[in-house]
Image (spheres, grey):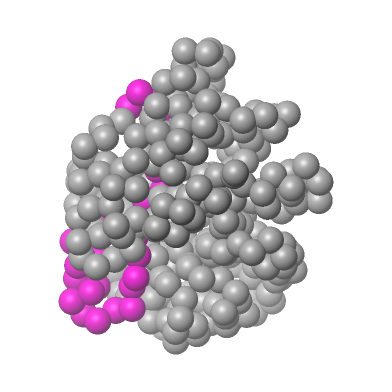
Amino acid sequence: KTLRSVAWKQDHRFVGVAVADDKLSDETYARTVAREFSSVTPENVMKWETIEPAPGEFNFEPGDRLIDFARKNHQLVYGHVLVWHSQLPAWVNEGEFTAEELSEVTENHITEVVSHYKGKVQRWDVVNEVFNEDGTFRETKFYQTLGEDYIADAFRAAHAADPRAKLFINDYNTDGIGPKSDAMYELVKDLLADGVPIHGVGIQSHMILDLYDAESYEANIQRFADLGLEVVITELDIRMDMPATEEKLAAQAEQFRAVTQACVNVDGCTGITVWGLRDSDSWVPGWFEGQGAPLLFNEDYSKKPAYYAMYDVF
Ligand code: XIL
């Protein structure tokens, strides 16, 4: 049995992985992604800087490659990401736009990308990381130029382009109840009340070993599910101070177990995606100094205790 098969038996939950385009050609990498996971998220290739590097010029090839891979391996695709302040091309981030112009540029981007993948991407992160830690809106290009309406507009444009795709708002440090997840909660409630086509909340869950409040995590997922929304754990990893020891890896496994259990406990929590395959594939060492080992597989593709813990819960 594999992770994907045991997860599927748990009420058809999916278990996904962020895939790095340049590694798909590695046979063992590809085989492991195909065998163990029922969903894939493009780690980078559907981000704005890659997919629309110049105005109106779209580079769909790497995304198409992943879609192809997913189809061959009977996997879902979780699209990431339409509107985000990071990994934007300079022509957007540094461009001088009136509100009308930026709104048109953004709508066109969403329409082109979602239409291209219509019927092939089942879920989309429509907006990503719109909040500051205190729950105020992040001052991005989009917010500064368009105000908070850019969020609702993005969902409407995505829905018009593929009415069957499930549309998500996604963020980090929204793992437990607190000012940031409270703001997310209020926002999605307002969007729903206004009839905006939003279907889910993504809880990124970039976590730190031993900093985890299981009760708060589950209560948070539950309150979003209670709004009738789907919840997906979209970017799970649990980093630790290096070097990793047997003890830390065992504690990490327990934390993966608890996170997985929280999802299984909530009906609306439909899947968990881990943010990379092996520890050596992870973004963590490059972004958080001295930290690493946050995933389910070792560099030689052997399974870590964390893998068995997730498997166990499913
Ligand atoms: C990260 C990728 O893993 C890296 O390869 C890239 O250099 C930077 O972005 N939140 C997100 C993801 O929504 O898109 C980010 O992915 C990690 C944080």
Identify the residue at horizontal 24%, vertical 73% (top origin). Answer: 191
Depth check: give the residue in front, 88 or 125.
125
Q: Position of residue 298 (x, y in %)?
A: 65, 28
Residue 112: image x %, image y %? 58, 81
Highlighted range, magenta? 184-211
Q: Nearer the viewer, residue 218 or 187?
A: 218
Residue 178: where, in percent of width, then height?
20, 43
> Taking 21 as reference, is 276 left or right?
left
Task: Find residue 287 and report its image quarter.
Answer: top right
Tell me the quadrant of the picture where the N terminus can be found: top right
Q: Position of residue 109 (x, y in %)?
A: 55, 76
Determine if residue 81 is in view.
yes
Q: Examine the rendered structure and indicate whether residue 314 appears above or below residue 279.
A: below
Nearest the eye: 93 or 22: 22
Quadrant in the picture for the C terminus: top left
Residue 255 vertical position relative to residue 39 in the rendered view, above or below: above
Judged left or right of residue 109, residue 268 is left
Residue visible at 72% across and 65% down in the picture: 72
Is residue 196 located in the magenta-colored stretch of the structure?
Answer: yes
Residue 206, can we see it?
Answer: no
